[in-house]
Amino acid sequence: MCELFCLSSRHPTRATFSLKRFAAHGAPDGRNVDGWGVAFHEGRDIRLYKEPEPAGDSPWVAFIEQRALATSLLISHIRRATCGANSHANTQPFARELGGRMHLFAHNGGFDDIAARFAASPHRFQPVGETDSEMAFCLLLDRLVPLWKGTTVPTLKARLAALTEFAAEMRPLGIANFLYSDGEFIFGHGHRRTQADGIVAPPGLWFRHRHRAGATPPAPESGVTIHDHHAGEAQDMALLASVPVTTGHWRPLAEGEIVVLSAGEFVIP
């Protein structure tokens, strides 16, 4: 299955990726070979790097690893294609503008019959590619449009209610692990995934929070190392991943659980 990872921190943080190792960490048989993407939020805008090819074959991966860009909000996706061709348009994370800011979405799983549901009514947002994941993102954004119409930023309560309704509609269609960010909050929804024993079951995402200084040691062969950018300052960091990618305590998300991250904290609305 695809691999998801996100980071939220109080201060800008450098996450050093070995995307090839990151993909292998979640799929030791090398299944995640169809594409990769990393998005860094910078205020209302983003830096998005993605390619429809194995991470080990891309010179852009070495560029990203060497740059180690500092950010307070990062979403990454490693793709195993199950719907749609291997193309840039079908590679995640997906990004769209709404309310004068960029929104990001990454999904792990598959949605049966979502094309019929999408075609049943007109939509402001249309997919560029052919994936069920991008159709789901467009459906989510259409649901969020009323919240972002005015000049006032919607409340977290309103945003979470919309995400909760969306997730409840997606779960019956298939496996619905996803990360969504509006630049202020990251929403992570855990569902099910194919586990090491081959059984499809929870958890679909894992969560970790830490409050400390210094580098976070990588898990063996995980491919992710996290460094504090502001040495000497108190740092909070919240992580979500398909499988744990660092040492330390990780909590599995319950089936259908949504967590909200902001500035390195787990947010309770």
Image (cartoon, rainbow, N blue to C red):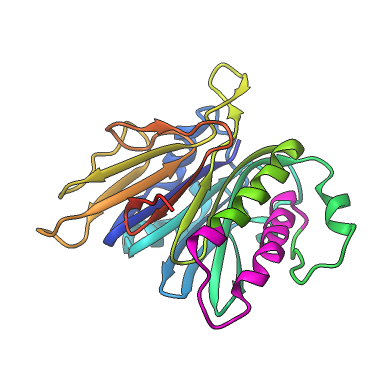
Q: Is residue 11 left or right of residue 47?
A: left
Q: Is residue 261 visible?
A: yes
Q: Is residue 140 above or below residue 244?
A: below
Find residue 93 and report its image quarter: bottom right
Find residue 262 and report its image quarter: bottom left
**Position of residue 55 measured from the top left corner of the image (x, y, whole percent):** 51, 49
Q: Is residue 93 visible?
A: no
Q: Residue at x 56, y 66 (%)?
A: 103
- Which one is in front, 36 or 56? 36
Q: Main secondary structure of the magenta part?
A: helix
Q: Is residue 189 left or right of residue 260?
A: right
**Position of residue 260 measured from the top left corner of the image (x, y, whole percent):** 45, 51
Q: Which residues are magenta?
A: 130-159
Q: Residue at x 50, y 66 (%)?
A: 155
**Position of residue 36 measured from the top left corner of the image (x, y, whole percent):** 55, 52
The verdict on residue 128 being magenta is no
Residue, far top? 197
Q: Residue at x 25, y 52 (%)?
A: 236
Find residue 230 and report its image quarter: bottom left
Q: Is residue 146 left or right of residue 260?
A: right
- Which one is in front, 53 or 212? 212
**Position of residue 221 measured from the top left corner of the image (x, y, whole percent):** 36, 33
- Which one is in front, 212 or 90? 212
- Which one is in front, 162 or 101? 162
Q: Residue at x 56, y 16 (%)?
A: 197
